Image (cartoon, helix red, strand yellow):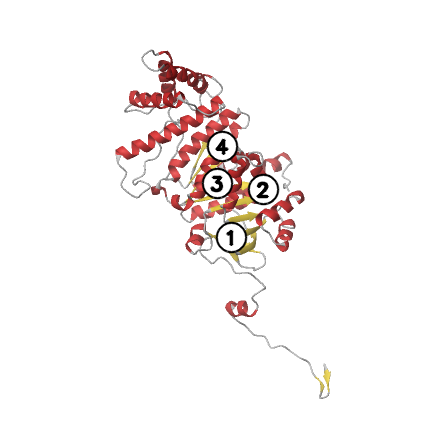
Amino acid sequence: MNNLRGGFRLRQRPFSETAFSFATAYPFLAGANLGHKGAYIGEDVYGGGAFVFDPWELYEAKVITGMSMILMGAVGSGKSTCAKSVVCRLVMLGRKALILADRKGEWDVVAQFLGGHTIKVGPGQPDRVNPLDEGIRPSVTPDGEPMTDLRWAAMVRARRLNLLQTIGEILLDRAVQGAEHTALSMALDLTVESAAPGVPTLPGFIEHLRQMSVSTDGSRSVAEAAERLLHAFSRCTQGDLKGMFDGETTANFDPDLPIITVNTKALVGASKEARKIAYACTGSWAESMVTNSDSGQRLCVYEEGWDSVSDEASLTRMMEAWKLARDYNIFNVLIIHKLGDLDIAGDAGSKMAAMARSLLGDTTVKVIYRQETANLAVTERELGLTRAEREDVNRSAQGTGLWKVGPYRTVSVKNQRTTAEVPVFDTDGKMRSNRGGEAAA
């Protein structure tokens, strides 16, 4: 370089500085991270640091105000691996997990990896679920008072009645009406009384409906209602539902296990009634687990969320779980491909559609993996993405997703897997084996 004093070479002297000082000097180069408390998920693409996540820690720090997450992405984008990373690593930190309605059975190996258990429901499966199980008794009531026998009996009766009504409405394909409510409650009480001190089951309940339908001692309207219910519920012991709900529970619903997965792969070809009843029964059991204050902190994952929102009983339970997640000490995770999956719940303007959309409004953590071009505009509009965030989602590589945590934090994260996790998280193994070992896209 030349000037009036002659030529010289400008050489910058090397120096070092703390990360804090650099962040102060260059505040717009990388956003603030979520801190160091939590499970390692991957790399902050733009900040370069580690991205860790723990919803309980974030709630305690007031970064988020709710305890629910929606994880969405096109097929092959890496969302399933992300879900398994979050679950596995938080379980290893002492949390527990419950995976509901695993239609592909891909969480079985995850449960085995973590020392948990898989429950397989469906025609021909070894596990039977008894709708009349009393559930898991907590040590205290929802009000924090000691659980008495009288209070527990009332709670169990209410849960059983609610589930029987749900099953009845599924089988009748309409709402339970008038005298049918009376017939349900009378038959339930008789079943519990006659089974004591054992466990009441559906065959016993159906037998009491049969006796009530031919009885001349009571109301004729109740007898006629019992007959209608008898024909509907008999399908559970004689029709296509036989063997699934007609005896004592054989499945291992142990709330102390680190993870329990519900494999519903066998229900894929079953009738819609079988699927709905299975979801109602497992959902009722799950409800008794997550509402138990003795159960600890638990992640509740709704795999293939589009299937869950299409069933009214499941959607109703999900809404309650979203609203009361903080009270239940749970963190909900709904996995979908795109926001349009929520529209499967019902026609625009319907009650079901409104319920599904309310889940989105009550969700404070949104993780968006690559979306198909046709879905980008809807994603941008409904999630309030900036133009830069939309482009980030559009060009995301496999395994990289945009995390919107609370109202102000957005981080692009490249999910990282350990060597041990790769075969556990792999959802394309079958495709590779069919193609002679070639990696699936």
Is 337 situated above or below 266? below
- Residue for badge 3: 301
Find numbered disc 1 in the image and state the secondary structure of the residue it sits on.
Answer: strand
Of circles 2 and 3, which is in front?
2
Mark 2 and mark 1 in contact (Cβ < 8 Å)?
Answer: no
Residue 285 x/y as whole percent: 40, 33
Alpha-carbon neighbours of circle 2 within 10 Å: few (<14), some, or many (≥20)? many
Label 2 vs 4, first from the N-terminus: 4
Label 3 vs 4, first from the N-terminus: 3
- Residue for badge 4: 312
What amino acid does circle 2 point to?
A: Leu
Residue 192 x/y as whole percent: 31, 23
Alpha-carbon neighbours of circle 1 within 10 Å: few (<14), some, or many (≥20)? many
From the viewer's side, name the closer residue of 237 and 17. 237
Q: Quadrant of residue 147?
A: top left
- Residue for badge 1: 405
Label 1 vs 2, first from the N-terminus: 2
Of circles 4 and 1, which is in front?
4
Find numbered disc 3 in the image and state the secondary structure of the residue it sits on.
Answer: strand
Distance of label 2 from label 3 (alpha carbons):
17 Å
Residue 126 x/y as whole percent: 44, 26
- Residue for badge 2: 339
What amino acid does circle 4 point to?
A: Glu
Q: Quadrant of the image for the N terminus?
A: bottom right
Horizontal side of 141 relative to 430 (left or right) equals left
